[in-house]
C-alpha cells in the first residue's frame, strides 16, 4: 500500500485550482474585451503580452540583484528617500526595487533612471 504525502496532495490541488483561475481569467478577459474602450484594450493587450513574455522566458533568470543594488545605494550614503528625490521617483519604488518586488526595471522611466544611478556607481546588472 502506497502512502501519499499530504503536502504533495495539497500541491496538486493547488496547481489544479491555479489552472482553473487562469481559465476563469481568460474567459473574463475574452467576454469583457469587446466592450472596452480602445485605451483599456491597449492596456489589456500590453498586460497579456507581458504575461506571455514572462511565461515564455520562465527559465531566464533576472540578472538584477536587489541586495547588490541596496549595497550600492548605502555605499553612496543615500537613504531611499534621498535617492528617490534625486531620481524623481517615490521612496516606495526604491524599496520595491531593493526587495525585488518590481521584476522589470527596464520598462518604466524611474526604473531606467535607477539603472543609470547603479551604472554610475559601477553596478550594471543588465549589461546595457
Image (cartoon, helix red, strand yellow):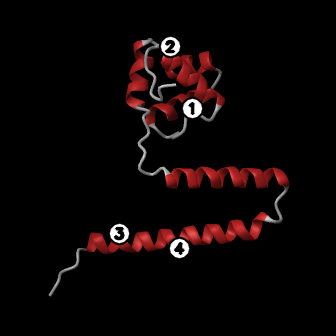
Left or right: where 37 falls relative to 78 = right
- Earlier in the chain: of badge 1 and badge 2, it is 1
SS class, disc 2: helix
Q: Residue furthest left?
A: 1
Residue 13: which quarter of the image?
bottom left
- Earlier in the chain: of badge 1 and badge 3, it is 3
Residue 32 coordinates in the image, percent (x, y): 76, 67
Q: CA distance from mark 1 to mark 3?
A: 33 Å
Q: Are marks 1 and 4 in contact (CB under 8 Å)?
A: no
Question: Residue sitting at 55 percent across and 19 percent down?
Answer: 116
- Earlier in the chain: of badge 3 and badge 4, it is 3
Residue 22 coordinates in the image, percent (x, y): 56, 67
Crowding at dot 4, Cα within 10 Å, few <14 / some 14-19 / many 20+, comes out as: few
Crowding at dot 3, Cα within 10 Å, few <14 / some 14-19 / many 20+, comes out as: few
The tag on residue 20 is: 4
- The vertical placement of 87 against 38, above or below, is above
Q: Viewer-proximal residue, 89 or 48?
A: 48
Q: Which residue is mark 2?
A: 120
Residue 68: which quarter of the image?
top left
Q: CA distance from mark 3 to mark 4?
A: 14 Å
Foreground mark, 1 or 4?
Answer: 4
- The vertical placement of 16 against 44, above or below, is below
Q: CA distance from mark 1 to mark 2?
A: 19 Å
Q: Viewer-proximal residue, 71 or 54?
A: 54
- Earlier in the chain: of badge 4 and badge 2, it is 4
SS class, disc 4: helix
Residue 90 seen in the figure: no
Residue 66 coordinates in the image, percent (x, y): 42, 31
Q: Which residue is mark 3?
A: 11
- Earlier in the chain: of badge 1 and badge 4, it is 4
Q: Viewer-proximal residue, 82 or 87?
A: 87
Amino acid at each position: 500500500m502506497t502512502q501519499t504525502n499530504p503536502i504533495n496532495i495539497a500541491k496538486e490541488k493547488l496547481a489544479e485550482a491555479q489552472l482553473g483561475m487562469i481559465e476563469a481569467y481568460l474567459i473574463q478577459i475574452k467576454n469583457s474585451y469587446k466592450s472596452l474602450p480602445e485605451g483599456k484594450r491597449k492596456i489589456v493587450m500590453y498586460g497579456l503580452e507581458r504575461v506571455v513574455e514572462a511565461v515564455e522566458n520562465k527559465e531566464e533568470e533576472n540578472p538584477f540583484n536587489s541586495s547588490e543594488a541596496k549595497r550600492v545605494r548605502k555605499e553612496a550614503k543615500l537613504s531611499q528617500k534621498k535617492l528617490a528625490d534625486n531620481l524623481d521617483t517615490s521612496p516606495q519604488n526604491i524599496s520595491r526595487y531593493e526587495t525585488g518586488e518590481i521584476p522589470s526595471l527596464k520598462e518604466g522611466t524611474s526604473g531606467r533612471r535607477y539603472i543609470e544611478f547603479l551604472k554610475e556607481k559601477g553596478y550594471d546588472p543588465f549589461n546595457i
